[in-house]
Amino acid sequence: MSAEQTHPVPALSLSVQYGTPAPDLPRWRVRRWVQRALAGAARASAQQNQALPVAVVLTLRFVDADEGLSLNNAYRGRDYATNVLTFEYDPDPEGTLYGDIVLCVPVLQREATEQGKPLLNHAAHLVVHGTLHALGYDHIEPDEADHMEALETAILRDMGLPDPYMA
């Protein structure tokens, strides 16, 4: 029995918003990345015998530096625009999980250049990263970070992309 049969991939409702232009990041591409993250999480939860939500409702918003700064300041008390912010909410009684993911396009572009990575590879990584946060994964504790990074790396490898944590 496959992981998807044991732990089905949650149904996805995804809204993609563009607070700033992101022509290289069309809705269809972002949806594919989120779906791959959900499938990878389903495989991981099957291996660990953990439950996933029945459905996931996400809003992913691309923002400029001003909006990124404002959100990071308001919700994390940090005075800079960060690459990705995720807001996860408790599942409803029917098992549907809700979340918001915010990607700051100028930070994403700057980081890709600084790290010598193609923009799409870096964007895919951050979409996967944000999706996993929405599902409850975190990287505050070292063991959590190791687990989340390993899952991100596996999902990206399945997408044909390199390990984002390798130099």
Image: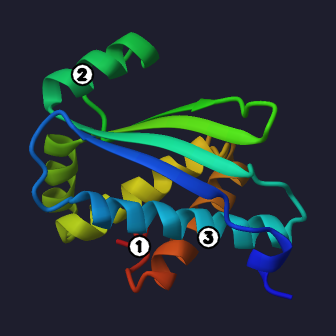
Where's the C terminus, which quadrant? bottom left
The colour scheme used to paint the residues is: rainbow
Disc 3 crowd, CA 10 A, few/some/many (<14, 14-19, 20+): some
**Residue toward you, 132 or 20:** 20
Check disc 3 and report the residue beneath it. Answer: 39
Image quadrant assignment for residue 15: top left
Q: Is residue 150 left or right of residue 156?
A: right
How far apart in space, not on screen, are marks 3 and 2 (Cα)?
31 Å
- Can you tell which mark lies on residue 69? 2
Residue 110, compared with residue 166, is above or below; it is: above
**Residue toward you, 21 or 73:** 21
Q: Residue at x 63, y 44 (%)?
A: 138
Q: Are marks 3 and 1 in contact (CB under 8 Å)?
A: no
Q: Residue at x 54, y 36 (%)?
A: 99
Check disc 1 and report the residue beneath it. Answer: 166
Q: Are marks 1 and 2 in contact (CB under 8 Å)?
A: no
Disc 2 crowd, CA 10 A, few/some/many (<14, 14-19, 20+): some
Residue 110 locus on image (x, y percent): 14, 50
Q: Closer to the N terminus: mark 3 or mark 2?
A: 3
Residue 65 locus on image (x, y percent): 15, 30
Q: Nearer the viewer, mark 1 or mark 2?
A: 2
SS type, badge 1 = loop
SS type, badge 3 = helix
